[in-house]
Amino acid sequence: MTIHLQRELETIRRMLLSLGALTEDRFRQAIHALNDLDVELATEIIEKDQEIDLKEVQIEEECLKVLALHQPVASDLRSLVVVIKINNDLERIADLAANIAMRVKTLAKKASPSGFTYDYRPMAEKAALMLKMSLDSFVHDDDAMAETVRLMDREVNAMRNAAYESIKKAISQTPHRAGYLMNLFLVSRHLERMADHATNIAEEVIYMRRGEIIRHTDFMDE
């Protein structure tokens, strides 16, 4: 590895970690907006989504430039591939945070003090922990931590299923509130997808460490 290539790879790594921190913060803001039905914060999250989009494009462009100029091989090539994939997962997580913010704005308009609601805090905190652990596993090259994240995905799937059953029952009892309740259910889908992307990041860390592609090697709950 040339010194120049090493420096460029380190720069890209720092850029990715900066994006990771920003995405994690945006996710936490979305959770806060959801818990409090904070329309002002939700609007801010939506308006700032493009900031992460631009950073994602910048990182991908830097990766492609290194691939073209240095033609890395072996572990260096694997690292770049992993960065490109994690970069995409982080952008998707940020999009899902914006989607939750849009649900917050809808829910805030239709919610009533006596109406049915659902406590997503346990599910949101679990997904947030998965994201943090997946990024930490990347920082510390910790494939054992990444494996733990994969296992946690099943817990989030179970929480999504519980939300579905609860909200389905509420729809049958109060069909006139079906629109509100469907928006409420979609929050669980967004959180579950966030956990899926955190799992993707963990799987890329395992690939980077071991050189093994482990996607689809077991049957996770859908």
Image: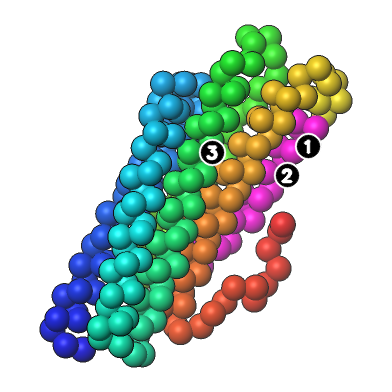
Are circles 1 and 2 on residues that touch, CB within 8 Å? Answer: yes
Horizontal and vertical percent position of residue 93? 48, 50
| Picture residue at 36% right of the left edge, 90% below the top | 74
Neighbours of disc 1 within 10 Å: few (<14), some (14-19), many (20+):
few
Horizontal and vertical percent position of residue 30? 45, 34
**Range shown magenta:** 145-168
Instruction: Check residue 153 for magenta coloring.
Output: yes
Circle 1: residue type: Glu
Circle 2: residue type: Asn
**Quadrant placement of the C terminus:** bottom right
Horizontal and vertical percent position of residue 61? 32, 67
**Quadrant placement of the N terminus:** bottom left
Q: Which residue is mark 1?
A: 165
Circle 3: residue type: Asn
Which comes sooner in the sequence, label 1 or label 3? 3
In this view of the protein, which residue sits in the foreground, 89 or 133?
Answer: 89
